[in-house]
Amino acid sequence: MECITALLPNNCSHNYDKIPYPSVCILIPAHNEASGIGMTLSSLKSQLTIKDRVIVVADNCTDDTAKIAREYGVTVIERNDTLRRGKGYALDFGLQYIKANPPEVVIFIDADCIVHPGTVEKLAKTAIFNHLPVQSTNLLKPPQPITPRHAVLTLAFLVKNLVRQRGMRRLKLSASLTGTGMAVPWFLINKVSFASSNIVEDKQLGLDFTLAGYTPIFCEEALVTGYFPQQQKAGETQKTRWVHGHLETLRSQFPKLIKAGILQKRLDLIAIALDLTVLPISLLMMLWFVSAVFSYLMAMALGIIWLPVITLIQGVLILIAIVSAWMKFGRAELPTRMLLSIPFYMFWNMGIYWSFLMKPQKSWVRTGRD
C-alpha cells in the first residue's frame, strides 16, 4: 500500500515562503569522524544564516574530529563517557548544552553526510509551521563503479526512506525518523527521552513522539545523502545494526503500539505498528519463498488449493511494489541487470538474520569509514 500510494501526486505540499525563518541550532553528534566531518560542515556552510548555530558533539573521540570541526568556525563540545556509549547519549549531551539558550528548532545531522541546498530552511519552516517533528529524505549513494550488492542495498534504502515515507505522507500517516535530516521544534524536545543506548535510537525516537501525540511528518523536498562503506566488513557491520535494531524494535514495540492504538482509538498508532512489520526486502522475499513452498506442499498433500493462490497473490504484490518503486524512483541510478542480483543478496543476508536468532546485537557499534 505504501509503495503504490507513493506513485500518486503530492497532495500534502505547502508554500512556506511567507513563514518567518525561525532560529535554528544544528546538532551534529560525531564519534571519530575526522574523515568526513569537513564534508558535512562544508555542505552546511552556504545554508547558514546569522540566526543559525552549529554545534558538534565530539563524542569519545580519539582522532582529530574536534580539531577539524573547530577549523570551520562551529561550536565544539567534547564528551568523554566510555560507560554510556551511543548516539542517543551524545544527542542528549548536546541538547543539555543548548538548553541555556534554546533555538526555536533543532536540526539533527550525522557527521558523515551531505546536506543538500535548501534543506535547512525547508526542515526548519516545516517544523515550525506544523509544530511537529520532521524527517527529510535520507538516501545513501552507492560507490562507483556500482556492484550488484550495493545496487540492491541502494534499492532497499530507497524503498524504505523515500518510497514508503512518501506513501505514508500521502496517507497522512506517521513518518519514520531515520537519524539524520531530522528537525524538532524546541518545545517538543522534553516530550521524549533522547538519552538511549538503543542501536536504532532514531526509530525508537519516532515511535516515542508518535505515542506522545506528536506524529512526525515527511518533508520530501529536503534531502540528506550519505555513502555506503566500500569495505565489505564495514558494510556488514552497518547492515547488522540496522536489521537487528529493526527486528528488536518490532518485537518489543509492536504489541505496545497496537494496544495503545486500540485503547486510544488512534489509527496512526496502528498504522505505524503495521509499518514496523514490513521486513527488510531480502528477508521478506526469503519468507515468501518458504511460505510458497509450504503452501504448494500443503496443496499436494491435503488438497488445500486456495493456499498456493494466496501465496501467489502475495508474491505478485511484492513484485509490483519493488518494480514500481524502482521504475519511478531508482531506474536512473540502478541498472536493470542489477535487479537480478536480489536472489544472491538474499543469501548474503542469511547470516545476519541467523545471528539475530543466535546472538542479537544489542550494543552500539560504529560503522568503519573509508
Image (cartoon, helix red, strand yellow):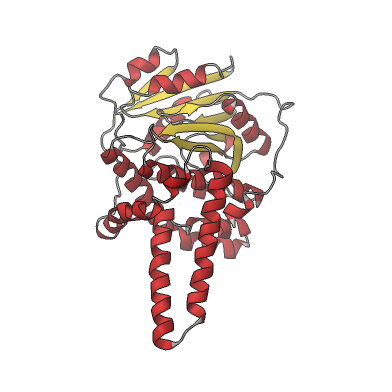
| Image position of 366 with respect to 159: above or below | above
Q: Position of residue 279 (x, y in %)?
A: 44, 57
Query: In the picture provided, is 14 more to the left or to the right than 209?
Result: right
Using the rendered image of the protein, determine whether residue 52 is visible from the camera's viewpoint: yes
Please report the residue visible at 51 percent of the width from the left and 60 percent of the height from the top.
318
| Image position of 255 with respect to 112: above or below | below
**Residue reaching furthest to the bottom:** 302
Query: In the picture provided, is 358 more to the left or to the right than 327?
Result: left
Q: Position of residue 74 (x, y in %)?
A: 45, 16
Please report the residue visible at 51 percent of the width from the left and 66 percent of the height from the top.
314
Of the pair 269 and 181, the residue shown nearer to us: 181
Using the rendered image of the protein, determine whether residue 214 is visible from the camera's viewpoint: no
Q: Quadrant of the C terminus?
A: top left
Q: Quadrant of residue 320?
A: bottom right
| Image position of 51 with respect to 18: above or below | above
**Residue reaching furthest to the front:** 337
Q: Quadrant of residue 62?
A: top left
Q: Position of residue 323 (x, y in %)?
A: 53, 52
Q: Quadrant of residue 338?
A: top left
